[in-house]
Image (cartoon, grey):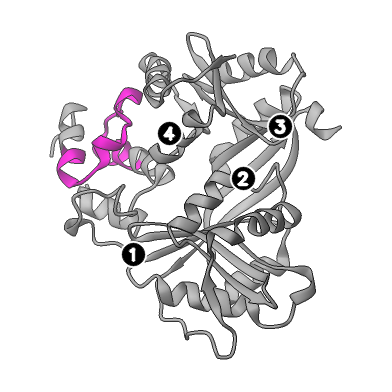
Amino acid sequence: MTPVRSAGEVLEAIQKVKAGATAFCTNFFPVQSKLENWVAHQELSFESSDDVIFFLRKDRDFAHLYFCASNPAAFGDQLRRFSSIPTQKLAIDLVGAEASVGALLKLTEEAGFARYSRLVRLARAAAPASPPKPPTAVEVATEGDASAILALIEQLFDRFADQLPLSYEIAAAVAARQIFVVKENGRIAALLFFETQGLTSTIRYWLVAPHFHSCGFGSALIRHYFSSQTTVRRFLLWVAATNDNAIQKYQHYGYAPDGLVDYVLVNGSAKN
Amino acid sequence: MKSVPEILKDIRPEFDFTTSYDFIMDGMLDSFDMMTLVSALDKNFGISIQGTDILPENFKNLQTIEALLRQSGAKL
């Protein structure tokens, strides 16, 4: 694998694959700012052939595998070759409408990856939400909260499926005032981490720490979130399809499936 | 045949695409929406948008999408 040294290098490599594409397919949808961060933090490397390019993004003890391929068959062939060197734990996300990911899912499984999780995207149109009821105090997270926020996210979410943030992402979200917290005796009892881009806002993590369930903190956070995002027209999030409890909560607040799914698969090294 | 604003409205009915000059920065279209839009434009206009043209700058606003359609052989 070759380390990626600039975002331009990534785009150039993708263009080479696209140029001869008959049925271009990909799972690589980074926004420019994320791509630049990955490059700056030396997380990204790549390997390319004429019709397929693989990107690996380092994350904790494994790597996310992304691809751009001129057609699905080329992707399958190259993935089998690529995954025959099982030296690293790999996770791959296949995103799209349910009907459109079937072929890539089959090819990925044939290359030795196993289904790990299935996420669904939920969407909510903007609608007035009643503000949190006192006395729950929702605060914007500060720099001093960053390590506790990361520890809670790592404790309660899944590293392969949930695209866990690294400490620099937490720091950036804190600086952008995109993490709300509820504290009890100085400890973070609940948090909501979101990203707003123009008219769309995505919840990345919404959690209540184990000892603080049924205190109304989660409800206070999400109501505060909706009432603070006054210019947002579309609210999004991804949730595990099997997490009925969370899905019911989101539906209560007006979210509904929008048809996109994300199959997360891992290779043999990650399963062990 | 539908117009480009009508197709965009089918994909994201909650937004008014006639008021934005940058659909991506304004959070009206994400990468997944772009792929949906490409399929809808191909079908509606009987064209095939090239892989090399599926770039954010070509989907920035109504003018850039219409320019892309003309370049791809669509009759607007």
Q: Which residue is mark 2?
A: A163
Q: Residue at x 15, y 35 (%)?
A: B67
Q: Tell me which corner region of the image, top left, top right, bottom left or bottom right, holds residue A247.
A: bottom right
Q: Is residue A160 above or below residue A80?
A: below
> Is any atom of residue A253 visible in this view?
no
Q: Which residue is mark 3?
A: A62
Could you say whether the residue bearing mark 1 is in a helix, strand or loop?
loop
Q: Which mark is residue A36?
A: 4
State the extent of the magenta-drawn residues as a range: B40-66
Q: Tell me which corner region of the image, top left, top right, bottom left or bottom right, holds residue A146.
A: bottom right
Q: Earlier in the sequence, mark 3 or mark 4?
A: 4
**x%, y% of residue A203?**
53, 60
Q: Nearer the viewer, mark 4 or mark 1?
A: 4
Q: Is residue B56 on the magenta stretch?
A: yes
Residue type at mark 1: give it.
Glu
The chain ID associated with circle 3 is A
Residue type at mark 3: give it.
Phe
Q: Which residue is mark 1?
A: B14
Q: In this rendering, do the residues under marks 3 and 4 share a single chain?
A: yes
Could you say whether the residue bearing mark 4 is in a helix, strand or loop?
helix
